[in-house]
Structure formats: C-alpha cells, structure tokens
Image: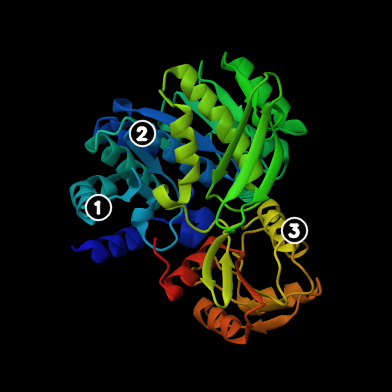
Amino acid sequence: MNYQETIAYLEASLPMFQRTGAAAYKANLDNSEALDQYDGSPHQSYLCVHVGGTNGKGSVSHALASILQSAGYKVGLCTSPHLVDFRERIRVNGEKISQEYVIEYVESHKDIFEEIKPSFFEMFVAMAFSYFAEEAVDIAIIEVGLGGRLDSTNIIQPILSIVTNVSLDHTDLLGNTIEAIAKEKSGIVKLGVPVIVGDARGPVRGVFTTAAVNHETSLTVATSTWKCVEQRLCDDGKLQHFHYEHAYKKESVIFDTDLLGIVQVWNLATVLCAVEMLRAYGCAISDEAFHDGILHVVERTHLLGRWQWFSENPRVVADTGHNTDGVRSVVAQLRSTNYEKLRMVIGITGDKDLRGILSQLPKEALYYFTQASVPRALKVEELQERAAGFELTGNTYPTVREALRAAMQDATAKDLVFVGGSTYVVGEAMQELNIPN
C-alpha cells in the first residue's frame, strides 16, 4: 500500500473516535498493553512527560517540546487529533513522522491488528512510541487523548505529570461532574512522580491533593505559583508579551511568545512550573533556551488551530476551542479584537454540550452554519434551529468549504471571519485555504 491507501485502511479497519465518537472508546488498557508488549515497550528507552487536561494541553505540550529542543534535546511530540494529515500527531524536533514509517509500521502490524482489533487511537499511540525509540529521542512529550486513567498513553512511566485544567467535556465517558472528570484525569498521577495542575479551583484541588498523597508525590498548582502581572499583544500583532512573578520566591520572568490568544496566560503559568520541575529533575534548560523556545513555539513545533490567522484580506482567524470553556475563551478573544462585522463559520459535533456552547456565542455576529464531513458532526439544519433559540441567526451551508467561501466573499476589509466550533471544521478550512500543516 502507498501512504494514502495505508491511512484509508486504518480508518476503515480501526474504530476512530474522530469519526464515530464513544463507539471507538475502549474502557481499559488491554490493547495498549498488548501492542506495547508486541513492540518491546519502546517508551522505556526515553524520558516522558505526560500532559492531560480538558483545554490547553496541546499548547502546553508544544511549548515544552520547543523549549526542550532549544535546550539541545531531541524531542518527540505525540498529540491528537490531527487537523489535515495523520502525521501531524507524531513529530520529532518539529518534523512529522515519515510516510514510509507509517506504511512499514502498519504492514508489519496487520496480524496483531487483526488479532486484538485496537482502536485507531490505540494504534497511533503504539506507533508514536515505536517511532520515538527508532529516532532515539531524548525525551517525549505525550499528550493524553481523552481522560487519563484509561487513556492509551497511560502505560508510560513519566518523569513529570501535568494536568492543565478540568472542565465539563466528554461527560458521556468521563462523568457528568467536575469531580468525576477530575478523578479520571488524576489517573495519570504516578507513584513518586511530581504532578502539576494548571488550574485547580473547587473540587479539583481536593481530587489532586488526594491523588498526590496516595501516590506519595508533590502537587504544584501553576496559577497559584506564577502570577501574570502583564499580558499584551506586541506592536506587530504576531507575538504576545508576558511578565510573570513567582508567588513564593523573589523571581520574575519576562518573555515574548508566538503563542497567541488570551487563554495562553494560564497555559504559560503551567509551562513555567514544568520548566522548574524539569530543571530539578536534571534537564539542562538555560534561560536562553527557555526564551528562545517560548518565542518560537508555533514556528518550531507547528502548533495549529490555536487563534491562528489564515488570511489577512479578508481577515480570517480560526480556533479549535470546542467545549463550553474553550468557546468562552474564544469569545473573550473575539471581544478584544477590532472588526466592523463579525462573521462566524461554525460547526459543532453532536456529542458536545450544545446549550453551553451556543449560550456563549455573540448574538451580534452573522452566522454561517455548517458541518464537517465526519459522522459525529451535528446536522447543520439542527444546529441552525438550536442556535435560533439563543438569538443566533444566519444561513446554512452543507460543507465547510461552501460556508467559508460565502463568509470570505461577503466580508469587507474591516470585517472578521472566525472559523471554529469543532476541530474538524478548522481542519477542513485549512485544507480549503491550503494552510501548511
């Protein structure tokens, strides 16, 4: 098989959460452990950092990868989902896994795939672990896919565990309360391995305090440790400037970063704590490496879809925020952006908290309702009907391509076209506009 045939085989043969949702979720680690045993536990040959959380884990993972690369380490980065190409999920020093490796791995694993019938995600994680060993990485940043306790990535023994935050998402699988979801996410805490929680308000702190005590390790709450005293967009609009002060030490850090979006203020507090912990472990991360790494996160690791500008004329920006808290942050970012008319290209998957998301969206915007080409997508007619109950009005478009083209054609130079509501909507918009991935 060639590369496209290989991906088609995987998508057709293995249950894929990206397409079918909960039906692809395996509530145990049996397949992951079987694949790991088959491959010889490759993740044991390099250091790992485990990053979970409801929102922000992608930004934190990419930032740490960039910083460690600046410090001279060979860094593996395992994230999900992909927006355009499967290979986005597995990178070494920013470079995507080769097509040849994907083909060879699948060819050599067909027998065990047929035997144990793993999910697409279980397969991908096993492939990532093997590829990092093949590439002899020094350290790998491993992003949790969903939850934590039963996530396929949770077979690793990391040197540091991170949970960015906890909010309501995937309630059908993780529980319908913050406390229940926090318990699932705390499942990545390991015996004696330090844990960082980015934001731990309400019952979240109690859950992680208990997890840390039970696993005889330390707990650091990032937003209580590093306080942001200045956050502003730099004059060129392509960088953000930050000034943090340590809550317990007479220390401050001032830096610029190509991570855009006001939500990064919380993610970067988590990154600062992680750098402290990695230095304590023995990673040689100089101040120069930190500043260089945090300045070039997007450029070096190719982070996609986080307040990413797709076009200047007309102005088109996209963000993958797809749950209530993520959309709330996106809307706050929109409120701080200048425009004459806001045009929203929106599609949502059917397993999300539709009421919570729609209640956040700005009523004054003109909507271009659409749906991504995945089975999980909410039908566009239903989206329009439900949105009307929240005074959100606009036309429907059967494809992202048509919705985006209409919005861009209607937009003036002073308007803003926003693309989001779903990772898959953003991915299809990237393909339409030929955005590099």
**According to the image, label 3 marks what residue?**
356
What is the crowding at mark 3: few (fewer than 14 residues within 10 Å), some, or many (at least 20)?
some
Residue 132 sits above or below residue 281 on the image? below
Task: Provide the residue designation for mark 2.
Answer: 33
Q: Are marks 3 and 1 in contact (CB under 8 Å)?
A: no
Say which residue label 1 marks.
98
Query: Residue 19's spot in the image, x, y percent?
Result: 47, 62
Q: Earlier along the polypeptide chain: callout 2 or callout 1? A: 2
Label 1 neighbour load within 10 Å: few <14, some 14-19, many 20+? few
**Left or right: where 197 falls relative to 389:** left
Q: Amino acid at mark 2?
A: Glu
| Residue 115 seen in the current view | yes
Q: Quadrant of the C terminus?
A: bottom left
**Total of numbered circles in the picture?**
3
Q: Secondary structure at mark 3?
A: helix
Return the residue nearer the eye: 150 or 380: 380
